[in-house]
Amino acid sequence: KGLFGLCNRSARLAASAAFAVSELAADVAGLVQQVGMLALAVGRVCGPMCSTLPLAQAFADRPLFELMPPLMVGLIMGTIYFGFASCCAPWAGFNGLDVPVTFRVAFGLAMVAYHQGIVTDPG
């Protein structure tokens, strides 16, 4: 057995690891395909409704790169909300959805103000 058994065992382990990775890749590819099909279906259904929203109209005639600052601000605001609601609030003694109302109201008003700042014509 000795060295030959160790090499044989390593080869079987590598083969099973490669098989597991290939199964994982196939599952991820299937998931990506399903998410893409879902996004297309939602786009077909919600596209006409979303095109009438003020935010969609504000960016309708602009290049795609001008959408990045509002997207980044949204991601930053989401990170702040998640950090406060899931980390800071529990440390302060609030449970789950019991995030202080003042924080929620202030956060909601900040989102509304940013939205209005984007969709309002400066002229």
Image (spheres, helix red, strand yellow):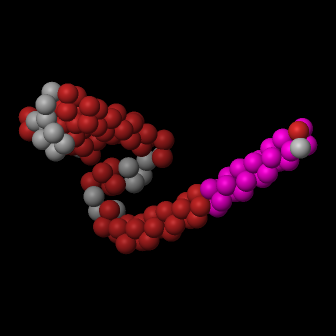
Residue drawn at x 27%, y 58% is 53
Residue drawn at x 36%, y 38% is 75
| Above or below 66: residue 18 | below
**Image label count:** 0
The image position of residue 28, as x and y in percent, is 58, 57
Q: Examine the rendering and report whether any part of residue 45 can be seen.
A: yes
Specify the quadrant that holds the N terminus.
Answer: top right
| Above or below 12: residue 78 | above
Q: Main secondary structure of the magenta part?
A: helix
Using the rendered view, name the quadrant where residue 31 is placed.
Answer: bottom right
> Magenta includes 93?
no
Q: Nearer the viewer, residue 43 or 36?
A: 36
The image position of residue 10, as x and y in percent, is 80, 44
| Above or below 43: residue 68 | above
Q: Nearer the viewer, residue 26 or 78?
A: 26
Q: Report whether 12 appears left or right of 40.
A: right
> Magenta includes 20?
yes
Residue drawn at x 75%, y 48% is 13
Specify the farthest residue to the left.
Answer: 102
Specify the quadrant that holds the C terminus.
Answer: top left
Q: Nearer the viewer, residue 117 or 74?
A: 74
Using the rendered view, name the quadrant where residue 57 is placed.
Answer: bottom left
Which portion, as a residue range, is magenta? 3-26
Q: Nearer the viewer, residue 8 or 17?
A: 8
The image position of residue 84, as x and y in percent, is 23, 32
